[in-house]
Amino acid sequence: MVVGGGAAGLSGALALARARRSVLVIDGGRPRNAPASHVHNFLTRDGTPPSELLAAGRAEVTGYGGEIMAGDAVAAERLDTGGFRVALADGTTVLARRLLVTTGLVDELPPVPGLAERWGREVPHCPYCHGWEVRDQPIGVLATGPLAAHQALMWRQWSSEVTLFLHTAPDPGEEEYEQLAARGIAVVDGEVTGLEVTGDRLTGVTLAGGRTIPTRALVVAPRFTARADLLTSLGLAPVEQERGGEVIGTYIASDPVGATDVPGVWVAGNVTDLMEQVVGAAAAGLRAAAAINADLIAEDTRRAVAARRDPFSPRREREAAEHRMRGGSRHGL
């Protein structure tokens, strides 16, 4: 079972279906990038609307025999006999030999009025996802933590008109001020209290004193919180991730192919890698699927060997009958 129908989940499901596994994808229908108009930095698919990319992925998965079910997986338990029982929000339960969880994360935005309504449009966080679209325009950076100066210096690559709004963050250090000045980045004191929107387009940032500064994009630093309720029901606790001494979010720890500390459970995409973009999430889903299939092959082989060694197993009796029909060759068994 794959829980999560985004790029990571569909990529994993596709690989498993092509490996002739029985695959069910549980899709809650809340992709993280739904507010964005296009997917970027996905080779051969740059500029594709997220909904179109997912529709194509679902068609590929079902084309190989995979199944997709709309719903929310809310809890799971590991069975004594192996495998898992997964409960859905509607009361349905489904059994699975292995789990690939690709539930992604939630972007928790700073509490500035109007910010959430423009998220994924003129309020971005990733320059590689949205920098090109706002190039050469006035870009503001909303400072909410110690990494704000670094963020402003990064966005300077896409525009010479960058303003760092100190908002609720501490003042930059002397070295940071020098770097900002050297790159021509303006620094504005005061808390941001709202956005100015003209004709459904961001045109400015309003400060507590009433001053409005022209801005066409306002960069934020969300807190990234893994969608991990299903995994916590299995005993996997989210881990805090720090950057520059600041906690930027939580994730579920895994090894390089997505295996977690619970045998039989893999993760891929933003639930385990907060910085992963769409193309990377798809690649991670493929890696996890290959590891899952290898694990299942090993289990299938162990079961086959055990059945072959059991003289009373149906397989053993069938082989014995075939042996007798061949005339009792010593090598038949």
Image (cartoon, helix red, strand yellow):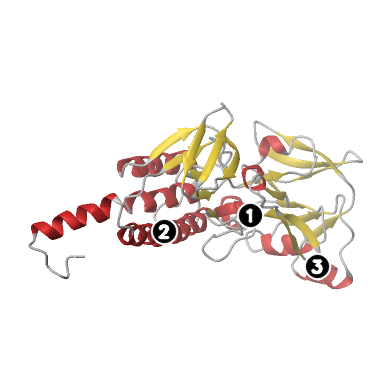
> Going by the image, does 179 lie left or right of 161?
right
Q: Amino acid at mark 1?
A: Cys
Q: Position of residue 28 (x, y in %)?
A: 54, 35
Q: Amino acid at mark 2?
A: Glu
Q: Nearer the viewer, residue 67 or 160?
A: 67
**Residue positioned most to the right:** 209
What is the CA distance from the residue labelled 2 to the residue labelled 1? Answer: 42 Å
Q: From the image, which quarter does the C terminus lie in?
A: bottom left
> Going by the image, does 318 lie left or right of 289?
left
User: Cβ–Cβ below 8 Å for labels 2 and 1?
Assistant: no
What is the CA distance from the residue labelled 3 to the residue labelled 1? Answer: 23 Å
Q: Point out the tag, 2 or 1, that comes first from the N-terminus.
A: 1
**Residue positioned most to the top:** 90
Q: Amino acid at mark 3?
A: Ala
Please tell me the numbered disc located at residue 181: 3
When the figure is inspected, residue 96 is found, relative to residue 263, above or below; the finding is above
Q: Which residue is mark 2?
A: 299
Q: Which residue is mark 1?
A: 126
What is the CA distance from the residue labelled 3 to the residue labelled 2? Answer: 61 Å
> Going by the image, does 235 lie left or right of 91?
right
Q: Position of residue 34 (x, y in %)?
A: 56, 39
| Crowdedness near tag 1: few (<14), some (14–19) or many (≥20) residues, C-alpha within 10 Å | some
> Going by the image, does 231 lie left or right of 241?
left
Q: Position of residue 6 (x, y in %)?
A: 50, 45
User: Cβ–Cβ below 8 Å for labels 3 and 1?
Assistant: no
State the SS at label 3: helix
Q: Position of residue 265 (x, y in %)?
A: 54, 53
Q: Quadrant of residue 304?
A: bottom left
